[in-house]
Image: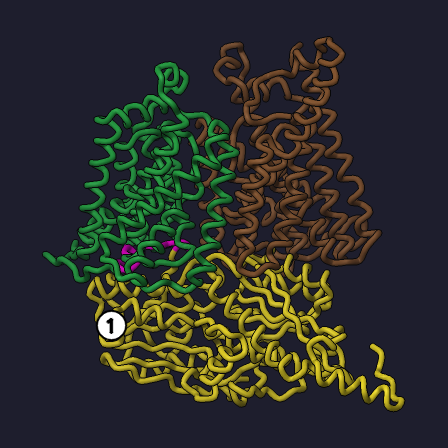
Amino acid sequence: MKMQPRSRNVFFTDMWALALLAPMILVPILTTNQYYYSLANQALIGLVAALSVYIMLRMDLLSFAVPAFMAIGGYAAAIAAKGGNTNLLLLMALSFAAPALVALPLGALVLRLKGVYFVLVTFVFNEILQLALFETPKLSGGSNGISGVPSVTLLGMDLGTNQGVVYVTLLVAFVATLITLAVTHRYRPEFASIEENETLAESLGLATWRYRTFGFVVAAGVAGLAGFALVNMLMTAHPSSFSSFSGINYIAYAIVGGRGTMLGPVVGTGLLVWSSNLFSSKGEYSAGLFGLLIIVVVTAAPSGLVGTIHQFFKAIRRRLSVSADLPTNSDAATSQPIKGGGP
Amino acid sequence: MNSLSKYGFRSALLTSLLAALPAWAQNCETKIGVLGPLSGGAAAWGLAMKGGVEFAAAQSNEAGGVQIGNRKCKVTVLNYDTKYTADGAAAGANFLAGENVKLIIGPVGSPEATGVKPVANRNGQLTFNSSFAKDAIGTQFPNAFHQLAGPSAWSPALVKAAKERFKITSVVVVAPNDQGGTDVASVNADSYKAQAIKTTEEYYQRGTTNFAPIVTRIMNLKPDAVDTASSPPGDAGTMVKQLLEAGFTGIIGRLGGPGTPEIIKAAGGVEKIKGFYWLELVATEDPAVKSMLVDYQKVMKVPAPDNTLLYTAAAATRMVLKAITAAGTDADATKVAAALRGLPAEDPYLGKGVWAGKASFGLAQELVFPVGMGLVADGKHLGVSRLDLSGTK
Amino acid sequence: MESFVSTGVIGLSLGTQYALLSLGFTLIFGILGVINFSHGGFYVLGGYVAYSFSHLAGVPFAIAVLLAALACAVLGYFVELLLVERHVNDHLTTMMITLGLYLIMTTGTLVVFGPEPAEFPFPVSGSFRAGGFFVPYSNLIVLGVCMLVIAVVYLLMYKTRFGIALRAMADDREVAIAQGLRPAQMFPMAFALATGLAGLTGALVTPILALEPHVGESVLAKSFMVVILGGLGSIGGATIAAFIVGIVEAYSSVYLGGSKGALTLFILVLAILVVRPNGLMGSEARKA
């Protein structure tokens, strides 16, 4: 099948994403610098959110609703924790399930919208959620949010120390990455056919709505996990953590890094989180510097950093094989027009 | 830190060289951090706070620096743009922790204060925020200080004065629907109700630029006064402009922070305003206070930011620098905090103040200097009178 | 009852402003397929350019507005030519580029003009009052300009060769190219037209409201909503949708309050899109 060499490539690259997470375990061991912990936490949380965007992009859908699902997951965990249930695994499950449950009926409503209409609806949904938080002060603390969220525990251990928080965030990132890997590879052919030509896929008998809904629900759950990690890091569930602008940031992480493989969000998040922290210390220039960086990276590497590196290697390989005067299998299978995405 | 050698001529020469050239001889540096929004809608506040801290630091450096032990150290200011979010403030505190900054002036707004306090607590950092939140500081955060009097301190006094002056019987309090808005508006509403004034709270969607619908809604309630509370200056200006366009003939209030020049400008000048009462964070017409603007221009070579958070941030910085000297260290926030608490609340420009907050927050770590109450009546600017809040507990 | 009528009048004023705002956005969106995140940035820039000419250089207001529109058009032309053109087929990349541009523009205005609102009043004050409701003259002028601009854009798009060419490009680029049209020449012009309109709107509307570096933030969301509601690529649809949004916002804000009013508006938009997935007057949805 024409898909296979490419999907093997993608799987290989995706495994790199998992592999890059592993060394993060060393961060709390090798240093006590709070700034590095903060960067690690921010990058891991950003990664999980970017993965939620990535899952949707695999179906050629752009979702601005990631912060909204993060809020649902985060607030659910906060309310449960304040109610006395601080078990880490329980909270993780809850923060995945709550937004996933909301995504189910929401998906039924909005997933038949195509392209940009879908994008707008997700944007509007985010605004609606912010307003809902404001209008329900008894449940959500309103504009003040829920502060003093107790730290999570596991098997009697309190994970509220600085190191503990990093480990919890790392676990969440790991689980989210595994989920994303599972979903995007188990259903790779289905998602890819929806991404390439949905009408054709439907005419071939694919119940696209089922897979789209599944992807949407899983993406919402993954976002919920990110929300939980964020609330845990801040010990607060605050509306300002789930603004539309943060949604734009997560999309940037996925696109700047490369939207064809899971490694893209990893690279994009790492670069943009680190530089955002750096630029924020430059006074009133912080936003402009960040914007400049985005423009520079995106124009230099339109298929994302990972995508561009892939193309670079491919070009080298092609040059080497051309010099050997033989067309190779990989050439035939992978020489497709660049759609502006993909490895 | 090593102490200078005590022996003979060489040390005397060295000391006189050091005294003569403070700039390059500073071998010790004290870092103060500033947290606040430096971009976006709240940038005016954040930049004013940054200006205040940098000014106080520059003045200190002109006098040789801050005294720690028997050395004078150069004061350096590091800043971080918190973007008015809880996670931004937390990231900022962690960034500063990575730079070994234990003493932070800021953050500015309520979401930021909420986000920073637990993190600063974990990092062992002192913070000095200016938020108007009901829980701006608290006993669970012993190293968190409050830079200015909260609404519970000035709202009752100002409301009472406004009622006496303008005979208000009904009021609409307008604010954006976020924590910065609700914190102040709700306290103001309580103060109005305590004065038996019929009160309605109206919250508008953050990001609104055209207030015509809100104005219509307010006009339908036919209030005697409209209090713009802590709405951002641009929003408040537009609202007042549109209120006057709609034929509002009542009193305008602004109990909630800087922004009155915009309202006066938007109304088209003082002559067009029937009645206006507002809070100034400091007694802006005190000659001593005004002289700070002159000194700012002299020291920083640029005009001061037009936002009264400048004064409170500078005063907080000066107090922290004094506390560093008293504690003999800038690396231990708890020691500096203890010294800070013991210092009298005094400032060369703002005069004598008090440490308040025991009643509202449970610990007396709110730096309260006299504030100002501004009045315009029948088109005439009656000036900003000093309001002494030293009775605040 | 008075209030009902005044609210309706306010809704129409709001609709006018949103229509002006969305025209530029729908042009770029409909023709290039680009979601222009910097739309709000050109709005603010237009305001500040007009302010600079009018208050710092003493130029009459109307001229300052035109100069602002021109400046934004020129800037937009070069932005498209240098940054967007190469990636115009990749909507996500162009979205990121325009986002970066927005951040730079907003920081630039903050650094140059400061965070406080600029003193930029509308030259005409006072209101037209009749039978219990009122309309500020400024709003009437903006309404007039809006009608004029919509008419001009309509004529441009439907009666001139340039406009027909642009629409052909929007409908089916390959065929249009086969017919000899050159996107590389036309797209920068289309972008310039759109940004010029945004700048014009900013120069006109910010004196009525407020001119600060961050007032562009909500512009994008509103324009986006109006354009989608009206249906992609439809100028008439965008205009109608603008008035619908304005009127709904006015009534819901006046009778339900600012916060609940916004919630109502958003839920309504959501509901409309669920019932009519291609917008009110749109035909075929473009892939994102």
Q: Which residue is mark 1?
A: B250
Where is residue C148? Give x, y as percent: 19, 41
Q: What is the quadrant of the C terminus of chain B in the image?
A: bottom right
Examine the rendered structure and indicate whether residue B157 appears above or below residue C222.
below
The chain assigned the colour yellow in the figure is: B
Looking at the rendered image, the quarter that the N terminus of chain B falls into is bottom right
**Which portion, as a residue range, is magenta?**
B205-217
Q: Residue at x 53, y 82 (%)?
A: B368
Kindly state the secondary structure of the residue where label 1 is placed. Answer: loop
Instruction: Residue B340: tell me if it is visible.
Output: no
Amino acid type of disc 1? Answer: Gly
Left or right, A1 with reference to B390: right
Q: Percent from the top left, x then y, of residue A232? A: 67, 52
Question: How many numbered callouts?
Answer: 1
What residue is at 70 percent from the left and 54 percent from the top?
A38
Q: Position of residue B37 (x, y in %)?
A: 53, 61
Which chain is depicted green?
C
Label 1 Cα neighbours within 10 Å, binned few <14 / some 14-19 / many ≥20: many
Q: Chain of mark 1?
A: B
- The stretch drawn in magenta includes residue B206: yes
Compare residues C199 and B366 and report the one nearer the observer.
Answer: C199
Which residue appears at 51% of the width and 80% of the height?
B298
Image hue for chain A: brown
Q: Is residue A170 visible?
A: yes
In this view, A109 is above or below A279 = above
The residue lying toward the viewer, choosing from B169 and B271, is B271
Q: Is C18 located above or below residue A138 in the figure?
A: above
Q: Nearer the viewer, residue B392 or A296?
A: A296
Note whether B112 is above or below A115 in the view shown. below
